[in-house]
């Protein structure tokens, strides 16, 4: 009997293999008519509010962790606050904007041709503004502690090099974006194992576990909006010295995760990736 669950998505189709789902077409890269659609601006507002709430809760918990025992929530509490908040917010916004809440996630999905360049740009602007406003709310409610405890900003911890911090951010973001791709894979829907309600769960858990391993090194950014917002509001030299790490690292990690999922896990053709690539149809089948 033929295995109807085996799917060949790269190169030429095998006529003996039944394709049990339709691979979504790559998203149009540039569509200026989107600017006239309320759905785009509604999605941008959703990204702004979600990022604001994410930074407010996460940075507020990080500030709380700086308090003297027994008031501090501890590293586990900080990691859980970030992970649980992402779980809740992705659940709330996925149907409106896709629930990115992170410029690195937006970049990763853009590279995989999941949205247009224009929409990605507007999302990132909304996320950055949300990060600044979220940090602003934390400062407004905990002004003294915010200033004394560094505003919950990200920087490379003492005893670690910039290279270690960069590597931690690359690996952490790679894990996150890889999970995002896997949790939203089209094949899950086709095979009846996709439960929309549970899609945010692995994403939130990924944020949680990455924070556990990365907080001691950089405070765990893996989200340029989360790192940039508190840096703007706190505005001390220490906040800006390592800021580049929290942009370069997440963007590299997101790019690698997108390429890994599209070409290694899914074996899709080059049209499913934004950057110039070699079509798998030109590669001998024995090497695919």
Image (cartoon, rainbow, N blue to C red):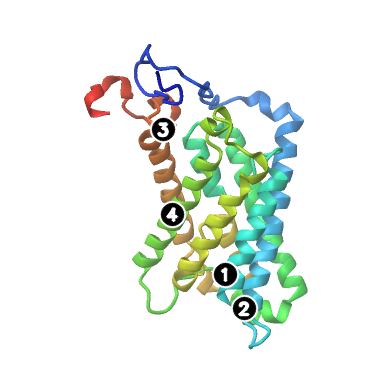
Above-or-below relation of 284 to 117: above
Secondary element type, mark 2: helix
The residue depicted at 70 percent of the width and 34 percent of the height is 40
> Are the residues at dot 4 and dot 1 in contact (C-beta closer than 8 Å)?
no
| Measured Cα–Cα span from mark 1 to mark 3 | 37 Å
| Measured Cα–Cα span from mark 4 to mark 1 | 16 Å
Q: Earlier in the sequence, mark 1 or mark 3?
A: 1
Secondary element type, mark 1: loop
Q: Nearer the viewer, mark 4 or mark 3?
A: 3
Residue bearing the label numbered 1: 153
Q: Earlier in the sequence, mark 2 or mark 1?
A: 2
Res 106 quadrant in image: top right
223 relative position to 64: left or right: left
| Measured Cα–Cα span from mark 3 to mark 2 | 41 Å
| Measured Cα–Cα span from mark 4 to mark 2 | 27 Å
Category of crowding for the residue at label 4, using alpha-carbon neighbours closer than 10 angstroms: few (below 14), some (14–19), many (at least 20): some
Residue 65, percent across and down?
Answer: 62, 78
The answer to whether residue 201 of the structure is visible from this angle is yes
Q: Nearer the viewer, mark 4 or mark 2?
A: 2
Residue 65 image label: 2
> Are the residues at dot 3 and dot 2 in contact (C-beta closer than 8 Å)?
no
Q: Earlier in the sequence, mark 4 or mark 3?
A: 4
Category of crowding for the residue at label 2, using alpha-carbon neighbours closer than 10 angstroms: few (below 14), some (14–19), many (at least 20): many
Residue 143, percent across and down?
Answer: 73, 77
Residue bearing the label numbered 4: 248
The answer to whether residue 223 of the structure is visible from this angle is no
> Are the residues at dot 1 and dot 3 in contact (C-beta closer than 8 Å)?
no
Residue bearing the label numbered 3: 266
């Amino acid at each position: 009997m033929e295995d109807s669950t085996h799917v060949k998505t790269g190169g030429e189709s095998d006529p003996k293999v039944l394709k049990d789902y339709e691979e979504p077409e790559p998203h149009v890269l540039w569509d200026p008519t989107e600017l006239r659609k309320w759905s785009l601006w509604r999605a941008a507002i959703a990204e702004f509010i979600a990022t604001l709430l994410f930074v407010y809760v996460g940075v507020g918990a990080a500030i709380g962790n700086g308090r003297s025992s027994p008031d501090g929530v501890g590293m586990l509490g900080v990691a859980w606050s970030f992970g649980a908040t992402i779980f809740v917010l992705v659940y709330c916004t996925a149907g409106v904007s896709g629930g990115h809440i992170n410029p690195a996630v937006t970049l990763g999905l853009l590279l995989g041709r999941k949205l247009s360049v224009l929409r990605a740009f507007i999302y990132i602007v909304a996320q950055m503004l949300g990060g600044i406003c979220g940090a602003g709310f934390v400062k407004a409610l905990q002004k003294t502690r915010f200033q004394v405890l560094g505003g919950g900003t990200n920087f490379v911890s003492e005893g670690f090099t910039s290279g270690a911090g960069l590597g931690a951010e690359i690996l952490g973001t790679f894990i996150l974006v890889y999970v995002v791709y896997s949790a939203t894979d089209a094949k899950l829907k086709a095979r009846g194992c996709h439960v929309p309600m549970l899609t945010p769960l692995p994403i939130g858990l990924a944020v949680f576990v990455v924070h556990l391993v990365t907080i001691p090194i950089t405070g765990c950014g893996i989200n340029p909006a989360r790192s940039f917002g508190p840096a703007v509001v706190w505005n001390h030299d220490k906040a800006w010295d390592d800021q580049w790490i929290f942009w370069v690292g997440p963007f590299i990690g997101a790019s690698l995760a997108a390429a890994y999922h599209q070409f290694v896990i899914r074996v899709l053709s080059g049209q499913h990736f934004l950057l110039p690539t070699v079509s798998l149809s030109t590669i001998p089948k024995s090497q695919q």
